[in-house]
Amino acid sequence: MNDTAGPGECPDARQMLDHVLSSDLRYLMGVSYLVLCNNQITNRYIERHYDMPVQAWSALYAIASFPGLLARDIQVLFPRPQNTVSRAVALLVGRGHVREEPLPGDARAKRLFTTPSGLALLDGILTAVRARQEEMFAPLTPAERETFLALSRKIALGPRLTQSDTMP
């Protein structure tokens, strides 16, 4: 696996990461590593500073971006189990950051809207998240960032990200 560790010795973290990112699984491992590292930092920050799980702030972001959104539609932007989304929405409603309005014709479905306190909360969170985005993408040039985004969009908007023949 590596040339620097002797028999029975563990390679250092950088060597292990380099190996995984050079393996036959390098594309999936690369995406996973980026996402999981960012989630680790972002989750910890949101939990410490706002006393909420990360899925609550992302739900708040979705609701502010698309007023009147249904909770089930949050999964389109942030693929998480429905019960996780429902708990996040309940927390936001309970804290007064989101309000619900029944959907005409379906009393169980609720349209979601941010409240002024929800918008103020989101504004503070977005300041930190934008700074984190800048920090995370600092190694890339502006052109590389645009290429990264274009490739990410192509994968995200393609049909094979959210469904699989290989892993049904």
Image (cartoon, rainbow, N blue to C red):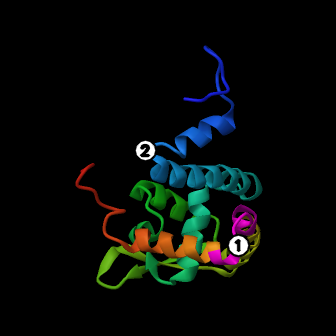
How packed mark 2 is, by other alpha carbons closer than 10 Å (few <14, some 14-19, many 20 or more), is few
Magenta stretch prevailing secondary structure = helix
How packed mark 1 is, by other alpha carbons closer than 10 Å (few <14, some 14-19, many 20 or more), is few
Which quarter of the figure is the N terminus placed in?
top right
Q: Residue at x 65, y 49 (%)?
A: 40
Task: State the mark number for residue 141.
Answer: 1
The range drawn in magenta is: 133-143
Residue identifier under label 2:
24
Q: Disc count in the image?
A: 2
The spot of residue 24 in percent (x, y) is 43, 44
N-terminal-most mark, 2 or 1: 2
Q: Amino acid at mark 1?
A: Thr
Taking the image as shown, residue 109 lies to the left or right of residue 17, namely left
On screen, residue 46 above or below 138: above
Residue at the outermost top position: 8
Whether 77 is among the magenta residues is: no
- Name which quarter of the figure residue 73 lies in: bottom left
* Element type where label 1 sits in the image: loop
- Name which quarter of the figure residue 83 lies in: bottom left
Q: Residue at x 68, y 81 (%)?
A: 116
Q: Residue at x 70, y 62 (%)?
A: 136
Q: Amino acid at mark 2?
A: Asp
Q: CA distance from mark 2 to mark 1?
A: 27 Å
The spot of residue 63 in percent (x, y) is 53, 76
Q: Nearer the viewer, residue 41 or 85?
A: 41
The spot of residue 71 in percent (x, y) is 43, 70
Q: Nearer the viewer, residue 131 or 90?
A: 131
